[in-house]
Image: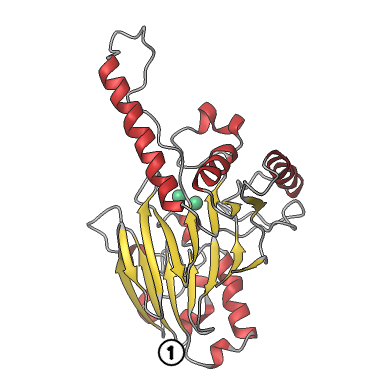
Amino acid sequence: MEIKFWGVRGSIACPGPDTVHYGGNTACIELNIGDPDRLIIIDAGSGIRVLGHDLKERGLLRHPLVADIFLSHTHWDHIMGFPFFDPIYLPDTRLNIYGPVTYEEESLDKIIGDQLSYRYFPVLHSELASKLDYHQIGEGELDLGDGIRLKTKYLNHTLQCLGYRFEYQGKSVCTAFDTEPYRNLFAMPPESPDYDPVTAEQGEQAASEENQRQVDFFRNADVLIHDAQYTREEYDPSKLGWGHSPFDYAVDAAVKAQVKQLYLFHHDPLRTDASLSALEKRYQEQYAGDSYPQIAVAREGVRIRL
Ligand SMILES: [Zn+2]
Ligand SMILES: [Zn+2]
């Protein structure tokens, strides 16, 4: 298994002198599993444009390109690069595109394809030369063939969003973006007239069970790539409910799940190279030692081999 980061940002692409080191493209990860031709792409943020160029350089576009694209969800930062992914204009390309849908009245192909309408773009989805097959998926398990198993789990985001766990020959890589900690939705101060201790206790238990299910999903993964958009100070309380995790929650989940390597991902566009580097150093120092995961901030261009 080989993993490569092509886009590590959340929300919006943010190129500039302060993001040169970690990169400014939005979410896109390449997985090569087993057979070197088996190409899996997770999310189609602006990073997928650069991946398309790289596939050409590697000569892969000289042959029919077959790939699976797994979309965590359809927020714009995770699909905005799709119209700029060159292989979709080549007649030999065949893509299977998987993802969850929140609004059942609209299908996945319509949600993705509407980006390619004259309102937004000069080429129509129906004009693309490639063959695209869309698959709406939810929580469960999929056999991807060639010995690759995929497990999926809903995350805590503002719409249906899937975490993925790819398993191959005893190795596993997990993704969890975009997500935030489950919290007690019935929490209120005891002095409030509507306070009900039973409801408050049930809410607390439900949140804790959901957070535990998330940890179970990550359990013993070789690599976990987790949302870490905010610092604790930014998250609590002003970004609560925005669907993203603070750094310390991502680290805590990885420690509890005993994953081997944690990559902090979906960086806020405000985060500069200097601030990401300082946060990386802080968590590496705090969790030094064999009993903790190796912690790194995800950076464009980095390759991980398992
Ligand atoms: Zn996002
Ligand atoms: Zn999102």
- Which residue is located at x 41 percent, y 46 percent? 214
**Residue in view at x 48 percent, y 81 percent:** 38
Q: Residue at x 66, y 62 (%)?
A: 300
Q: Amino acid at mark 1?
A: Pro
What is the quadrant of the C terminus in the image?
A: bottom right
In the picture provided, is 302 more to the left or to the right than 242? right
Residue 280: x and y, percent? Answer: 70, 46
Helix, strand or loop at disc 1? Answer: loop
Compared across the picture, whether 301 is left or right of 107 comes to right
Nearest to the observer: residue 181 or residue 143: 143
Residue 71: x %, y % from top left = 42, 63
Above or below 302: residue 288: above
The residue that disc 1 covers is: 91
Q: Residue at x 47, y 83 (%)?
A: 89
Q: Is residue 128 above or below residue 110?
A: below
- From what the image shows, is residue 287 above or below residue 221? above
**Could you say which quadrant of the image residue 197 lies in?**
top left
In this rendered view, identify the residue nearer to me: 250 or 65: 250
